[in-house]
Image (spheres, rainbow, N blue to C red):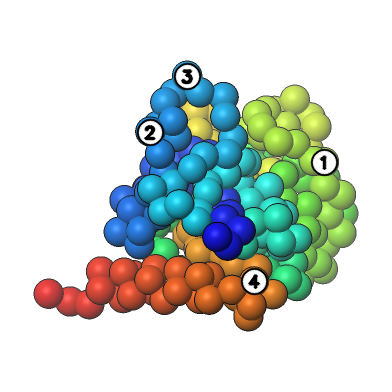
């Protein structure tokens, strides 16, 4: 029996949207996966030569890039932030839509950018690249949550964070001032595994066919 294929998925909203698509591609987790009381991170699948691991979104990319998992699903923000050479994102799944934006305190935005800014974000690489294009040196304060507090408490003048409806920004007195990246969830694979394991290529073909079928006009 071949070594089980490891499929990494993120916790949260993307996973909820991905599960129906995964099922149609033949990736169906066992009952324990849906048990909200379970603290397990690795799960069997109905397909006996595959297992799922459920980890944080940033860790999905790391597991796949280093070959610990061969396939995964993650937002394009994570793919762009890490830019791993061993990571390939062949299929845009058309789910998990949001965008990455710069936001600051409403009423304090200006038309002229200073040469140096302090920005709070969990995306240091994307943040620096964005401001470099504008001729601004960004000092990034790494935060993993509660981003909206940073400007109001003086930790930074701006934040770079994911935006879906914009309600969280509004409720915390912030306003979106520029958009960096439109985001959707992608199927990602390890490049070496794609070349050496036909099961990986078959999964890419299955997901690509599903997405193509959903985008063809009726």
Label 3: which secondary element: loop
Q: CA distance from mark 4 to mark 1?
A: 35 Å
Q: Gap in Å between the C-alphas at discs 3 and 2?
A: 12 Å
In space, the residues marked 2 and 1 are separated at their CA atoms by 40 Å
Q: Which residue is mark 1?
A: 141
Residue pictured at 40% horizontal, 39% vertical:
30
Which numbered circle lies on residue 193? 4
Labels 1, 3: front one: 3
Q: At which x and y percent is residue 85?
A: 75, 72
Q: Is residue 64 left or right of residue 21?
A: right
Find out whether the residues at labels 3 and 4 contact each other: C-beta distance under 8 Å. no
- Residue tagged 3: 37
The numbered mark, 3 or 2, whose residue comes first in the sequence reads 2
* Direction left: furthest residue: 218
Looking at the image, is mark 3 or mark 4 earlier in the sequence? 3
Task: Say which of marks 3 and 4 sits in front.
Answer: 4
Q: Mark 1: which secondary structure?
A: strand
Q: Report how far apart the C-alphas of labels 1 and 3 lie in the structure.
A: 35 Å
Q: Is residue 113 visible?
A: no
- Vertically, is 147 above or below 137? above
Would you identify the image quadrant in which residue 88 lies? bottom right
Disc number at residue 31? 2
Tag 1 and tag 3, C-beta contact below 8 Å: no
What's the residue at 41%, 64% (across, down)? 93
Of helix, strand and loop, which one carries label 4?
helix
Q: Nearer the viewer, residue 21 or 184?
A: 21
Numbered circle sitting on residue 102: none
Residue at 75% x, 36% y: name it. 143
Q: For mark 1, does the 10 Å Cα neighbourhood hold few (<14), some (14 to 19), or many (20 or more) residues?
A: some
Q: Nearer the viewer, mark 2 or mark 1?
A: 2
- Mark 3 or 2, closer to the camera: 2
Q: Are marks 4 and 2 in contact (CB under 8 Å)?
A: no
């Amino acid at each position: 029996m071949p070594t089980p294929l490891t499929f990494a998925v993120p916790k949260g909203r993307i996973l909820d949207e991905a599960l129906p698509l995964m099922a149609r591609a033949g990736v169906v987790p066992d009952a324990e996966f849906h048990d909200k009381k379970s603290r397990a991170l690795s799960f069997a699948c109905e397909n006996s030569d595959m297992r799922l691991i459920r980890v944080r979104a940033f860790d999905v990319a790391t597991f796949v890039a280093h070959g610990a998992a061969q396939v995964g699903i993650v937002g394009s923000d994570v793919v762009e932030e890490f830019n791993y050479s061993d990571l390939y994102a062949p299929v845009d799944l058309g789910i998990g839509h949001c965008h990455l934006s710069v936001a600051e305190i409403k009423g304090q935005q200006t038309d002229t950018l200073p040469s140096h800014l302090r920005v709070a974000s969990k995306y240091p690489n994307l943040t620096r690249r964005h401001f470099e294009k504008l001729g601004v040196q960004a000092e990034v304060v790494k935060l993993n949550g509660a981003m909206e507090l940073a400007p109001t408490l003086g930790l930074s003048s701006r934040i770079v964070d994911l935006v879906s409806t914009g309600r969280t920004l509004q409720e915390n007195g912030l306003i979106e001032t520029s958009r960096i990246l439109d985001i959707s969830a992608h199927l990602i694979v390890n490049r070496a595994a794609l070349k050496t394991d036909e099961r990986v290529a078959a999964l890419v073909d299955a997901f690509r066919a599903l997405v193509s079928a959903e985008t063809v006009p009726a």
